[in-house]
Image (spheres, rainbow, N blue to C red):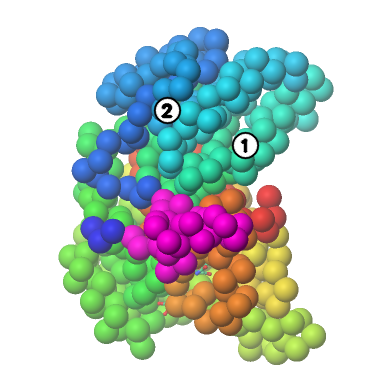
Amino acid sequence: MARVKADKYTQFVSQGFGKELAKKLGLPQPAILRRFDPTQPLISGPVLVIGSSAGADDLAHALLDWQLDVRRVATPKQKLGAIILVLDELADPTELSEPIRTAGASLRDLSPNARLVTISRPATADQEPAMAAARNGVDGILRSLAKELRAGATGNGIVLADGVRTVAPSALGALRFFLSGRSAFVDGQFLTVSTDAGEAPADWARPLEGKVAVVTGAARGIGAAIARTLARDGARLIVVDVPPAGDHLAAVANQVAGTALQLDITREDAGEKILAHAKERYGRIDIVVHNAGITRDKLLANMDQGRWDSVIAVNIAAQLRINRALLASPVFTAERPHIVSVASISGIAGNRGQTNYAASKAGVIGMVRSTAGLLAPLNGTINAVAPGFIETDMTAKIPFATREVARRLNSLQQGGQPEDVAETIAFLASDVAGGITGNVLRVCGQNLVGQ
Ligand code: NAD
């Protein structure tokens, strides 16, 4: 797979004269992020597992199977590849002090592009106030720490529902995702593992081996990257886009050795068309990625009906209609179906000029949470991925100055690449993520917009 390029500014300030100049002028110095490369180790350098619970011991033991150099105590001044903070038995906020200060003492030893991962339990309204305070405290710690990390290092958290073990398949799957270069642009975020479901792949380099995946809006941008990434991970692809994008779609289908389906997803019978194509060519569908989306920005005072209705039609109404058809068909429901929907941080935080788009993307999030309940009896999952600023044709249309500011407004001080969104989707679409459903995972470099 082609190496992902950083933007020109990031390349300029990452070495030599540019680096010196940026330092002198106090300009942002984004790092070249470590992205997934199957020929490279999962993480380089020792992994420090902090925590005294049985769950911490179990996890440290399980990580030895990944050929990691696992440490339970730090060696001063020795560089670390990752810190894993296991906080699965908190009952009171005072218990945070020791593990967090232990982690703090090692932060300066983190290598560039290192990882910090917390493992904790959810705070809920029915808990003792002290326990809920301690558990929710982890949220504040992780989000702050992610902002303190430097040189491409990221911090993310795994929240394990009560009863789910630290070594549950999806807990390990999420940990592996966060440690690896696949999560390069995911920062300051939490994934919730709600059950012990999920199954590790026979080969971690081909986690989607033999799966049949549908990707909408795959002729270009993020959709094309999703198709390439799912294919690299072993999936067979059906790529979908509107007829006018047919040539580009055919090129993507060729690249991934998949089949192209020219289809406007807003058609009443779009779901049936997808099912019929899949049944004829592959006999089934395992994964559906709802990626196709459009923007028609205007302040609401100037918004015409066409702009409003088209965005709702493509971005959410089509997904709802297609899902209804999918869930009614054994072509999709027979075996562990997975759906991943592309939302946006605009659907979380709102954005000026985007009431229509934000309504559709917040709608995707609502739809995903509700559909999780429908997929659970089928051992299926549905999750949303909410990209921040991603370098695509969509964002290339933003005027230069606005674009330059927008792409720096996150902890990693750069825009993400389509591949970053694609890697996250590939993880959520895999069987190891079977215990993760109804989540919204931001791929935004911890954008300052929203949470
Ligand atoms: P893009 O415009 O480059 O690509 C979108 C693709 O969807 C196009 O190929 C288009 O032809 C296709 N499409 C549009 N309407 C369709 C329809 N009715 N039927 C079938 N296909 C249709 O956009 P992108 O930047 O790659 O965005 C992909 C997704 O990511 C969208 O859902 C978008 O809202 C979301 N997103 C993008 C960003 C970003 O920064 N680029 C940020 C947040 C969310």
Q: Secondary structure at mark 1?
A: helix
Residue 300 image offset from top left, x and y in percent: 76, 81
Q: Quadrant of residue 265?
A: bottom left
Of circles 1 and 2, the one toward us is: 2
Classify the position of the N terminus by image quarter.
Answer: bottom left
Q: Any magenta on residue 19?
A: yes
Q: How many marks?
A: 2
Q: Is 123 situated left or right of 207 in this image?
A: right
Vertical side of 391 occupied by 15: above or below: above
| Tag 1: amino acid | Leu
Residue 145 is labelled as 1
Q: Any magenta on residue 285?
A: no
Residue 299 image offset from top left, x and y in percent: 74, 82
Q: Secondary structure at mark 2?
A: strand
Examine the rendering and report whether any part of residue 215 can be seen: no
Vertical side of 230 occupied by 305: above or below: below
Mark 1 crowdedness (10 Å alpha carbons): few <14, some 14-19, many ≥20? some
| Tag 2: amino acid | Leu
Residue 344 is labelled as none
Q: Contact, CB < 8 Å: mark 1 with mark 2?
A: no
Which residue was labeled with disc 2? 80
Q: Earlier in the sequence, mark 1 or mark 2?
A: 2
Mark 2 crowdedness (10 Å alpha carbons): few <14, some 14-19, many ≥20? many
Residue 4 image offset from top left, x and y in percent: 33, 60
Q: Quadrant of residue 156?
A: top right
Q: Is 368 situated left or right of 198 in this image?
A: right
Q: Which residue is found at the position 61% from the left and 40% from the top?
A: 148
Q: Which residue is found at the position 59% from the left and 51% from the top?
A: 411
